[in-house]
Image (cartoon, coloured by chain):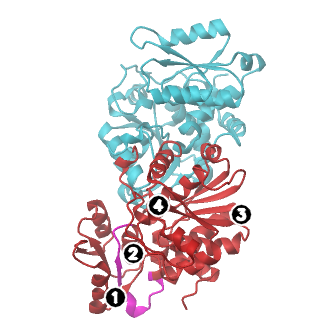
Chain colours: A red, B cyan
Amino acid sequence: MNQVSYANIVAAAQALQGVAHRTPVLRSRQADAASGAQLHFKCENFQRAGAFKFRGAYHALSRFDATQRLRGAVAFSSGNHAQAVALAARLLAMPAVIVMPGDAAPAKLEATREYGAEVVLYDRFAEDRAAIAQRLVRERGATLVPPFDHPDVIAGQGTVGKELFEETGPLDYLFVCVGGGGLLAGCALAAAELSPGCKVIGVEPQAGNDAQLSLRSGAIVRIPVPQTIADGAQTTAVGELTFPIMQRLVSDIVTVGDAQLRAQMRFFAERMKIVVEPTGCLAAAAVMNRVVDIRGRRVGVVVSGGNVDVARLGG
Amino acid sequence: MNQVSYANIVAAAQALQGVAHRTPVLRSRQADAASGAQLHFKCENFQRAGAFKFRGAYHALSRFDATQRLRGAVAFSSGNHAQAVALAARLLAMPAVIVMPGDAAPAKLEATREYGAEVVLYDRFAEDRAAIAQRLVRERGATLVPPFDHPDVIAGQGTVGKELFEETGPLDYLFVCVGGGGLLAGCALAAAELSPGCKVIGVEPQAGNDAQLSLRSGAIVRIPVPQTIADGAQTTAVGELTFPIMQRLVSDIVTVGDAQLRAQMRFFAERMKIVVEPTGCLAAAAVMNRVVDIRGRRVGVVVSGGNVDVARLGG
């Protein structure tokens, strides 16, 4: 039951039809010149709630049965998953509780509440958010929606890859950021079906290369919370479900540094006129800095989200 | 010969085919909710060189005869027209001289030179840029490309409206920013042909409402250089060619203040994840602040450009 296949991605696409945005694929002559390749940017920064996370969250919630819908969803997240679950729950008219750290950015707390979710705050230094979420599950009968390690979430994120290949046709490479691996695993499944020759490359922050270490050692490696501006990739380990898919379908994991992410964020704003958050810059920074030899190739680049304080774009 | 008709816009579209970007038309649920209308944003911030100006410049240069091509183009501008003429000249393999103030933003001087143009600097307080440009025309036999008051420029800018209506079908309203009126006149010609019932509204900065005064008084009104962050609309008068078109086809001119432009720039960056310069926010600020009663209507909004220091987006 925990297997995910391309058929699940097709089902997710149907569930998301008319609800999620079919985001544009942008081209840039300047980016092509800098990379030496032909780049196709799949822009999930234009997705509802500002990131690809909405796809997996909505798909998971849309598959709740009647009792689950009544009791609602629980999630713990200080980032895009929180807002994604909150928005999905509102659209599906069910309650949602999001467990967030008390010191989260006020804008993120506010956005989550604006979508109608109940926010339960916790002390990051004294309390365990997973335990709090489990208590809510027990007390309320609500269903926990994990940020990446769930078949419906992986299938939902896979619709990013499906839409990209449907628009571009087969590609030589696909670069995708890695946190817990939900987006990467989903996109790799889509690539295997729609562009079988395509090499899928995951991109991590240098400070937190646990997915790279895991893929190269053949077992999930757990690391301390990495210090990086790519807050969506500050995970300590990939998932039990996402890892086997990565082992089977991902060619390699590469890394980029925070300075490269800052430069990429600025390039997106100044040259391509789009707002992209640091995590959303991972894949693009790898191709623009030619971390892999992609000269002359047709390359897909997933831009995962755009939720960043705009005051930081000049940085 | 100075008349511009829809046939000229069709010819311009052919000249621009495969050269200018066919820019996307974006939608936003949040903008719809705020305006009470159904908004269609035509995003010329994604145009080559970052603004609609490339369309008119390239179209004008593409119609040069063999002698004109040899002698090249002259333009005076400290803004988007400078870079548009520079890029168009490079693509058409002809020389270009741009007359720019010595105190122009270094980034703009650099961008213009990067496109391969010769830059002639002048002292804004002691010298007359039009006289300098005329001397270059005399000495070199080069052709002056005016920023708005030229039939080929107006026809080129009209392709913005043509593409928009081709994508959206007929609209109830079209909002367009006004500086010299080239974009507004071109879009009004496109609207008259493709969406005859559509009301076309020009939008100016409050500090420089010369087009509004002109349209209401029936004669071109000239004002001192207005103090506004909308640097692309700091013109002192509309054109001899653009004004009669506006009189015939534009329903009204409305104004918005700099504070509204700043809020709109921030909305575009934070909510729609796009970088838009202050002048590019004029039309959107008018609809988002409901300056005209557009409730329930289908409304086109031209986003004219995205060339702004990204450090200012947080402002």
Callout 2 touching callout 1 (CB < 8 Å): no
**Is residue A298 found left or right of B201 in the rendered image?**
right
For the residue labelled by badge 1, is the local secondary structure a helix, a strand or a loop? loop
The three-letter code of the residue at mark 2 reads: Val
Callout 3 touching callout 2 (CB < 8 Å): no
Kindly tell me whether residue A66 is visible in this rendering. yes
Residue B153 percent coordinates (x, y): 61, 29
A195 and B150: which is toward the camera: A195
**Is residue A194 found left or right of B104 in the rendered image?**
right
**Is residue A270 found left or right of B146 in the rendered image?**
left
Task: Look at mark 4 in the image and give the residue it sits on.
Answer: A305
**Quarter in which the N terminus of chain B is drawn:** top right
The three-letter code of the residue at mark 1 reads: Ala
Q: Which mark is residue A85?
A: 2
Q: Earlier in the sequence, mark 3 or mark 4?
A: 3
Task: Look at mark 1 in the image and give the residue it sits on.
Answer: A142
Q: Does the magenta stretch include residue A68?
A: yes
A53 and A237: which is toward the camera: A237
How many C-alpha atoms fall within 10 Å of the one at disc 3: few (<14), some, or many (≥20)? few
Q: Earlier in the sequence, mark 1 or mark 3?
A: 1
Calculate the distance from the C-alpha at mark 2 to the C-alpha at mark 1.
13 Å
